[in-house]
Image (cartoon, rainbow, N blue to C red):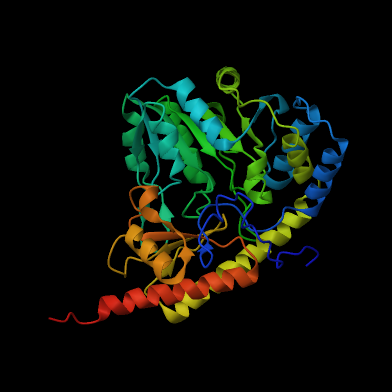
Amino acid sequence: MKYDFDTIVNRRGTDSSKWDVGENELPMWVADMDFQTAPEIREALAERLAHGVFGYTDVSDRWREAYAGWWQRRHGLAMDRDALVFCTGVIPAISSTVRKLTTPNENVILQTPVYNIFFNCIRNNGCRALESPLVYDGRAYTMDLARLEQDMADPQTTLMLLCNPHNPVGKIWDRETLAEVGRLAKKYHVTVIADEIHCDITAPGREYVPFASVSEECREVSITCIAPTKAFNLAGLQTAAVYVPNPVLRHKIRRALNTDEVAEPNAFATTAAITAFEKGEAWLDELREYIFYNSRIVINKLNEALPQVRVTESEATYLLWIDVSAIPGDSREIAGKLRKMTGLFVSDGVQYGTGGEHHLRMNIACPRAVCEDGTERLVRGLSMLMKAANEPATT
């Protein structure tokens, strides 16, 4: 490999949300990576730093060209550059959109289990999170389109939050499914906010389908949130974009983001995004290979030691979704015991809503040695819990 993903970078003492843990604890929970970002991006940021003046920053045409070029090359979506709006993050964009396009007590659809912060975006803005659960057959997930239609048909339903690819289950939604979502949304006058932040972290050889690219119906009802932050580990730089092809919706979203003061970049935000999309392709492709190999380490070890524990075959993201239903207790209890017994800190599935009660989410975007350490802790801890569950009760 040209790029180095094996070096362990000490993140303790850097005000890292992820690494604010005990000395012997290993955090594999929140979705940021333990890799340094691409050297091309670091060089561009160093050059910007050397300039030494960090005044107010505009969004340039080059920023729009970088986004449009990337989505055309990588994802086959021809973007109208004028339909791109800068935002400091995907979550601020979602919250602003919910505020702008709803009135209190309306429904916003979520397909659970799903990223937990979505619930905050909805409830903090006075709306109801309407869970439209995915269907799980013990191995993979599909949409319950009949249930989705029922939920969209509710006159109180205004918005749907589509996670594409889906966090935490790692599902890449196919073109036919997305087309049906668009058709239903158009029929029932529901706007679809598509969170596509994980779209560039797909398994080697796999490609995601942008919701807005599927049909005219999808295009007209969509507000797509995108960013280089997951793929290039740039979340702390607060750089994202919203793509809104429908000019009426776009005007509303521009007003929402400006009203909430989340539409202006800091001095490093656009530099990082432009460089990622112009020069980061080779680094990203190697990263995807590396993450996929990490996933095989965890899956193979679990299959060998604990075949009762299943990992959903992930098509995207650097997150593993682990079915621990063979172990008594809900995932919150199991995650707590794992952390206490082994120091491994993973996310419990309870927080992701209906369908997450018996799953754990594990972040494997880390150097190989860290992944192997986390895998050993996971297997050891779950084995202890499994053994305890199978021991006969004493009187």
Q: Residue at x 64, y 70 (%)?
A: 368
In the depicted view, which residue is nearer to us: 278 or 68?
278
**Residue 212 visible within the image:** no
Identify the image quadrant of residue 327: bottom left
Q: Residue at x 46, y 63 (%)?
A: 312
In the depicted view, which residue is nearer to us: 195 or 24?
24
Left or right of 172, for residue 322:
left
Q: Residue at x 82, y 40 (%)?
A: 49
In the depicted view, which residue is nearer to us: 246 or 350?
350
Image quadrant holding the C terminus, namely bottom left
**Residue 56 visible within the image:** yes
What percent of the width, then of the height, locates residue 135? 36, 52
What percent of the width, then of the height, locates residue 382? 39, 73
Image quadrant holding the N terminus, namely bottom right
What percent of the width, then of the height, locates residue 169? 46, 55
How many labels were placed on the picture?
0
Question: In the rendered image of this protein, does residue 233 appear above or below residue 345?
Answer: above
What percent of the width, then of the height, locates residue 220? 55, 26
Q: Residue furthest left?
A: 395
Left or right of 23, for residue 241:
right
Left or right of 141, for residue 176:
right
Question: In the rendered image of this protein, does residue 382 appear above or below residue 145?
Answer: below
Question: In the rendered image of this protein, does residue 361 appear above or below residue 200?
Answer: below
In the depicted view, which residue is nearer to us: 250 or 47?
47
